[in-house]
Amino acid sequence: MVDVHLKNIVKKFGKTIAVNGITLDIKDGEFIVLLGPSGCGKTTTLRVIAGLEKPDEGHVFFGNREVTYLPPRERNVSMVFQSYAIWPHMTVYDNIAFPLKIKKVPREEIDKKVKWAAKLLQISELLNRYPHQLSGGQRQRVAVARAIVVEPDVLLMDEPLSNLDALLRVKMRSELKKLQRRIKVTTIYVTHDQVEAMTMGDRIAVMNAGKIMQVGTSEEIYLKPSNLFVAGFVGSPQMNFFEASATIKDKNVLLDAGDFTVTLEGEFAEVLKNYDGKTVIVGIRPEHIYPLDLIASKEKTSEIEGTIDFVEALGSDTIVHINTGGMIVVMKMSGAHRYKIGSKIRVALDLRHIHIFDKATEKAII
């Protein structure tokens, strides 16, 4: 196992900059997730770490050893692909054993390691089968077993669960995480699925347009997004955003959104003193908005009135879209609550969980 360090990595394809100056330090034995939308550069970053792509600028270190221009075979990395990439004409045993045979490992050692990997992935009874005889989940386990059998320093995973059905994805998420904890291999995992990222990663690196927007634990990313992109990308339903003109008055901050005004008291005035008379972007998550008749205390809240425009009854949750006249505000409630489209509703914004962003830089102020 090793720690991995990316220093100012730049990768271009023609005039397109796929990775734009990424610096990232990954700890020995850490499970880190590269999270972002399609085309953000996360897979290219993974391929640079693997040695499948050479960076145009920057350096890659495994521990103190620079590996920037070393081929994959000299890096002791393993990669699990979205498409599994297991050989259809080989048995499960031979698929798992293949990288060991390439390295000319003695037959007895191969047998020992294949059975070890198969036991870890709970596929020992499948060793004599062929891939066409396996389910998607079983094929994915074979791909992971083949990756760990060589005991790599770094394990790379590129959207390995995206081809599985929803229930199997949930099961495989927990199994992969438990496996990684058991073998303690430094793991870099690529996904566009925020639930995967937040449930599996020790830390998450949120990427967009070839850059890292924020690195942190799932709690840090969710509760304290550092910019507008992270705030909007992480969380379902998405955070509510609205533009508001800030006015500081009597040590309070009035945020005028047009259809409603939010009043922030106390320390907010000091933080926002440079934004007096300017427009900011206010954000609040759907779960931090409550029907007025269901809250015991109205302290540190701001009220909004609107009409219920749409209701998503999801069983465990109910998502309510409220039309305030000029915008739609989304509220997330327990599935026990029922709401009628077209009815009036008054809700409270929990100001303890409000976020404010600079409109020009999109960086978080609060």
Image (tube, rainbow, N blue to C red):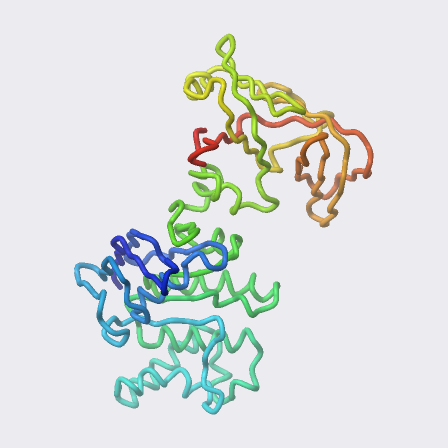
Instruction: Compare residues 216 and 70 and report the one nearer the observer.
Output: 70
Indicate whether 260 appears above or below 104: above
Please state the total of marks drawn on the protein image: 0
Q: Position of residue 297 (x, y in %)?
A: 64, 20
Q: Position of residue 303 (x, y in %)?
A: 66, 23
Task: Kindly indicate the quadrant of the structure image that contains residue 4.
Answer: bottom left
Q: Residue at x 49, y 75 (%)?
A: 83
Q: Residue at x 31, y 83 (%)?
A: 100
Image-based side of 200 in relation to 58, left or right:
right
Q: Position of residue 42 (x, y in %)?
A: 41, 59
For this orientation, the residue located farthest to the left is 64
Q: Quadrant of the C terminus?
A: top left
Instruction: Compare residues 128 and 237 and report the one nearer the observer.
Output: 237
Q: Quadrant of the N terminus?
A: bottom left
For this orientation, the residue located farthest to the top is 250
Q: Residue at x 17, y 59 (%)?
A: 64
Q: Position of residue 136 (x, y in %)?
A: 56, 75
Instruction: Compare residues 150 and 42 and report the one nearer the observer.
Output: 42
Image-based side of 158 in relation to 63, left or right:
right
Image-based side of 350 in relation to 326, left or right:
left
